[in-house]
Image: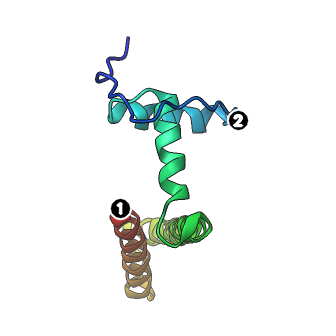
Amino acid sequence: MTRTRPRLRQSVHRDQVRSVRLTRDELDTVKRAAEAVGLKTAGFLADAAVAVAQAQGGPKTWLLDQRGRVEELMAASAQLARVGNNLNQIARILNSGGQVEYVDEAVARVLRAAARIEAAAIEMARR
C-alpha cells in the first residue's frame, strides 16, 4: 500500500468532478509522479491542471513550449541514434584492422547531438 502524506485541507473544497482519459503508460507516469510528491493521483492531476492553466503566458504558450522541447529532444535523440550506428560501423572496421577516414567527423556529430540533448534536457528541467 502506498503511503501518502496527510491531506492538507484546502480553503475551498473541490466539488467539481471531471473524467480524464489516459493511456496505460500515461496513467503509470502520472501515478509515479504523484507518489513521488506524496499525493493521490486525482489530487496530483488537479494540481497539475491548475498549474498549467495558470502558467505565465497562458496554457497554450506553456503547452506549445513543452511540445517544442519534446520535439527537440526527439530530433536530437534520433540524430544520436544515427551517428551511434555510424560509430558502430567504424568500430567494426577499426577492430578488423581497417582504416576509416571520417572518424573525426562521426565523433564530432556524436558530440554535437549529445550536446543538443543535454541542452534540451537542462532547459526542460529548469521549467
Residue occupying the far top of the picture = 1
Instruction: Report x, y in % for residue 19.
Output: 70, 32
Under mark 2, the amino acid is: Arg
Q: Is residue 38 visible?
A: yes
Q: Earlier in the sequence, mark 2 or mark 1?
A: 2
Q: Which mark is residue 125?
A: 1
Q: Residue at x 68, y 33 (%)?
A: 18
The front one of 125 and 100 is 125
How many residues crowd around disc 1 within 10 Å: few (fewer than 14), some, or many (20 or more)? few
Q: Which mark is residue 103?
A: none
Residue 3 versus residue 38 in the image, above or below: above
The front one of 86 and 79 is 79
Residue 48 versus residue 33 in the image, above or below: below
Question: For residue 111, what is the image quadrant?
Answer: bottom left
Quote the CA–CA distance across marks 2 and 1. Answer: 26 Å
Disc 2, SS = loop
Residue occupying the far front of the picture = 11
Instruction: Report x, y in % for residue 49.
Output: 54, 47
Colouring: rainbow
Question: For residue 70, what is the image quadrant?
Answer: bottom right
Q: Residue at x 51, y 71 (%)?
A: 76
Residue 86 versus residue 17 in the image, above or below: below
Q: Residue at x 42, y 38 (%)?
A: 33
Q: Residue at x 45, y 87 (%)?
A: 102
**Mark toward the viewer: 2 or 1:** 2
Question: For residue 58, what is the image quadrant?
Answer: bottom right
Under mark 1, the amino acid is: Ala
Quadrant location, the C terminus = bottom left
Disc 1, SS = helix
Quadrant location, the N terminus = top left
Residue identified by numbered label 2: 21
Count of marks, rendered view: 2
